[in-house]
Amino acid sequence: MLRLIKINRRLGGFALTDINLEVSEGQYYVLLGRSGAGKTQLLELIAGLGKPDTGAIILDNVDITRQRIQHRKVGIVFQDYAVFPHMTVFGNIAYPLRVRNENKKSIAEKVENAATAMNIKHILERSTEKLSGGELQRVALARTLITSPRLLLLDEPLSSLDTSLKDDLKRLLRNLNKAGQTIIHVTHDYGDAISLAKRVGVIHNGKIIQEGSVDEVFKNPSNRFVARYAGIRNFFSVEISRENGLLTGVTKHNVRFKLNGENPGRNGLLLIKSDSIVLTKEAPMDSKLNTIRGKVTEIIPSEFGMEITIDAGDLFYVNILTSDIEKLALLEGKEVWMSFPSKAIVVLSSN
């Protein structure tokens, strides 16, 4: 449906570089990146609010790279909603149709249908100045969707909403997508990607550095930056060698890891998810496991229960249930054993 081919665009000291991207019909694609990564700039190029220096934008097999915004079958909802404060909700939603000189009866029917779909029919006569953030977001969505875009672009649609409003809007966006709407959603929030995306891309410094299904990207991050987004905090630079026929990684603090799979080279970066590590009072007897002894240095609440920081020469971060604190009698300063299988380790080349 949408293809971006070698898109390059310089904006002052920043540049989008060699962007290649494909979004198929009916897909929910989330583009994840920090502020300043180039997410919004890329959306604006797709929408027609700017033009790339080089490269092509193809929609439904038609080159729209130089096509005017009003001729593209693309709708965009901005982070700040961009509703008209001097108009009612009805006036805002109806605006694109009035610009097209549609008749009043058609406009009224389409506005009512769009407002019903967004669950804002009851506020059509209200001023937008008195609406909540969630209501404003729905007005902006209704105004965009009333033009029946082939592709819906969302710029940080959930960033200014509280948790309950976020959940409502996520449900609405999922339903839109289930009904067949193709969506590209840019965000800095990893949680949005996990809960909404069918495919995800990670953009950093104007380049898409990894792309694929949610599982492909976050279970097998290609580098430290993507791993950070996946919530992985355990990173270890290691020297890799074979010892007695087994692949081993050793940190500069002499923490040793049993590895499996192919050797990525002499040096590598090890990643271990915090919830892949099991804590025990005694050393596990299974010789196939990685077993490491360390000292608890910090115990703090986390969204998963409790996060335990353990000093084993290198620092490890382990997520456990709150109830396990008492079972293990964990206290700061106490020694504990960590264990995890080799398959829980992701090894990246450090080159």
Image (cartoon, rainbow, N blue to C red):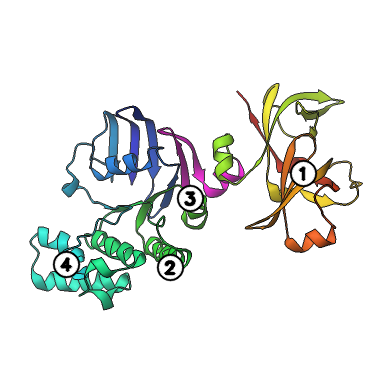
Whole-angstrom CA distance, mark 1 to mark 2, is 39 Å
Foreground of the two, 293 or 181: 293
The front one of 5 and 93 is: 93
Q: Nearer the viewer, mark 1 or mark 2?
A: 1
Q: Are marks 1 and 2 in contact (CB under 8 Å)?
A: no
The amino acid sitting under disc 3 is Asp
In this view of the protein, which residue sits in the foreground, 96 or 122? 122
| Three-letter code, disc 4 | Gly
Q: Is residue 199 on the magenta stretch?
A: no
Q: Is residue 242 left or right of residue 179?
A: right
Q: Mark 1: which secondary structure?
A: strand
Q: Mark 1 — residue?
A: 310
**Quadrant of the frame with the C terminus:** top right
Mark 1 or 4, closer to the camera:
1
> Label 1, label 3: how many angstroms apart (C-alpha)?
27 Å
Residue labelled with disc 4: 91
Q: Amino acid at mark 2?
A: Asp
Residue at coordinates 27% horizontally, 71% vertically from top-left?
115
Name the residue beneath numbered marker 3. Answer: 189
Name the residue tied to disc 2.
Answer: 168
* Separation of residues labelled 2 and 4 (CA atoms): 24 Å
Q: Which residues are magenta?
A: 200-220
Q: Which mark is residue 119?
A: none
Q: Earlier in the sequence, mark 1 or mark 2?
A: 2
**Badge 3 or badge 2: first in the primary sequence:** 2
Q: Position of residue 183 (x, y in %)?
A: 36, 53
Between 231 and 257, which is closer to the camera in this rendering?
A: 231
